[in-house]
Amino acid sequence: MKLNQDGLKNRKEWENAGYKLPEFDRKKVFKKTTEHPCWIHFGAGNLFKAFQANVVQQLLNKGVLDRGLIVAEGYDYEIIEKLNHPHDEYSILVTLKADGSIEKTVIGSIMESFTLDSRNKKDFTNLQTIFKQNSLQIASFTITEKGYSLVNGQGETLPDVKRDFKNGPKQPESYMGKVTALLYTRYLNGKHPIAMVSMDNCSHNGDKLYAAVRSFAEQWEKNGSAESGFSDYVKDKTKVSFPWTMIDKITPRPDASVEEILKQDGIEELTPVITSKNTYAAPFVNAEECEYLIIEDTFPNGKPALEKGGILFTSRDTVEKVEKMKVCTCLNPLHTTLAIFGCLLGYRSISEEMKDADLRRLLERIGYTEALPVVVDPGILDPKEFIDTVLNIRFPNPFMPDTPQRIATDTSQKLAIRFGETLKAYQASETLQTTNLKGIPLVFAGWLRYLMGIDDNGIPFELSPDPLLNTIRPVVMNLKLGSNIDTSALKPLLSSESIFGVNLYEAKIADSVCSYFKEMCKSAGSVRKVLKEL
């Protein structure tokens, strides 16, 4: 069994092996897609294949859509050359369910794929042709937050961006330069409207995309390499929109155990590819069953009926509420809690942590008791049901090979958003008191205990990467278990609004944090003891 056009002709063989196959006439869909493209996506990675491509396939199967997707890869061209093209744009989605079952789907909704490479004349000309078409309604992106940045960590303009600013849209090198050049092609060929939709997992993602595109448009107009009026076109929401979105779906790297399942089914040529840019990719993707995509409903050229595939369209304000609900209450704070205590207790997977009754009770306290009373209900997703799904389906899923060590990365950058917003809401409340909080102060104390780099058995462990480790770790690194802990040295750290979102002394929980920290430092096993007592 080969994953390509010829290999899929024997449908019965695939169906007998338990695979769901595309149910639409692919030749007809290909013809209509290439003649009248509707949706192009930038970023040919696992999330796109597991989520957006699967939604489109379902709608093609139902006859709701008559056109498929076109995808362009602008970071790692080898994905297109070594995976998409050899498999005739097909991929396999393996949905790993929390009940232990798996669902295998051959995804065939991608009609064409190109490299976003201005030096590849054939591919870039094809992309320009697509952007000239009035039928094109959506250009979407999953390129990570870094993909929209025009500067480095020091705030200096990146070299390829600097060259693109100067040289104009003819042969850009940077990702956003190439995207803006394609939009300029659309401007020159009818000024057709379009929605530029970032689907990356970052707050106010549409603004990040807009800021990058606007910068190029203004620079090119300023130096005369683009026609006067292009930047007005980019800024005109009736012509070009940049909706905010919230996306949530766990799609880990292709797993060897999943590859083995597919091999046992008789599928050939599944070996993952490790590209020269160290991208780990395969002809299959494995993902959890839960998924959310909420999009601000601003599409100046109309949109396909994606709501019939479970995608939610709403106002910008509601998108922000959903994002805040997820990041500040119903998912991310609970993830960080598991990351900190998972490292201290020696766990190597999130799903294993969810079998720990003490940790589960802590998550329930933080989610339901402490955070839920201050969450803003977005109206289209119920916050309690969201937490229910996280705790009962998503985190316990044994197929999701996520580790507390990975999630503990950059914790110093996460606490202010993931917990600070809840503390601010308590401070602003007339009825809720921060002094009643127990779970959130325990997480902060757990993080300080984590920074000591000694687990609950008294064994040293390696801390996950964090840009502030050299600054904050010296506060606790010389403390020893069983010693008399002087918490006065913690005051500068616990006062830091940049770390915690609020000054913990002003929020009246610093004493609780210090008390928990001292208890967890008494001896080996004290972390577990404090968790049980709570």
Image: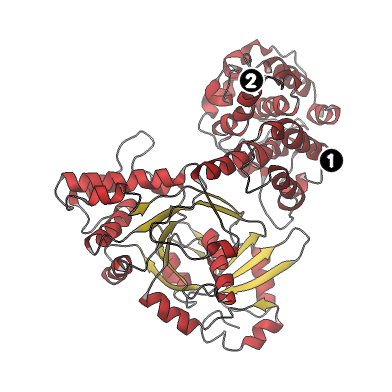
Task: Please give left or right for residue 237 compared with residue 259 in the image.
Answer: left
Circle 1 residues within 10 Å: few <14, some 14–19, many ≥20: few
Residue drawn at 36 percent across, 33 percent down: 154
Front-lying residue, 45 or 409:
45
The amino acid beneath tag 1 is Ala
Toward which corner of the image does residue 489 lie, by quadrant?
top right
Toward which corner of the image does residue 462 lie, by quadrant?
top right
**Label 1 secondary element:** helix
Toward which corner of the image does residue 450 lie, by quadrant?
top right
Q: Position of residue 211 (x, y in %)?
A: 35, 43
Q: Position of residue 519 (x, y in %)?
A: 78, 20
Quick check: 233 above or below 158? Answer: below
Residue drawn at 69 percent across, 36 percent down: 337
The residue pinned by badge 1 equals 357
Q: Position of residue 46 (x, y in %)?
A: 54, 61
Circle 2 residues within 10 Å: few <14, some 14–19, many ≥20: some
Q: Position of residue 525 (x, y in %)?
A: 82, 29
Of the 4 image quadrants, the one containing the N terminus is bottom right
Quick check: 439 above or below 338? Answer: above
Residue drawn at 32 percent across, 65 percent down: 131
Answer with mark 2 or mark 1, whichever residue precedes in sequence: 1
The residue pinned by badge 2 equals 427
Q: Which residue is situated farthest in the left direction here?
A: 224
Evaluate whether residue 38 shows in this view.
Answer: yes
The amino acid beneath tag 2 is Gln
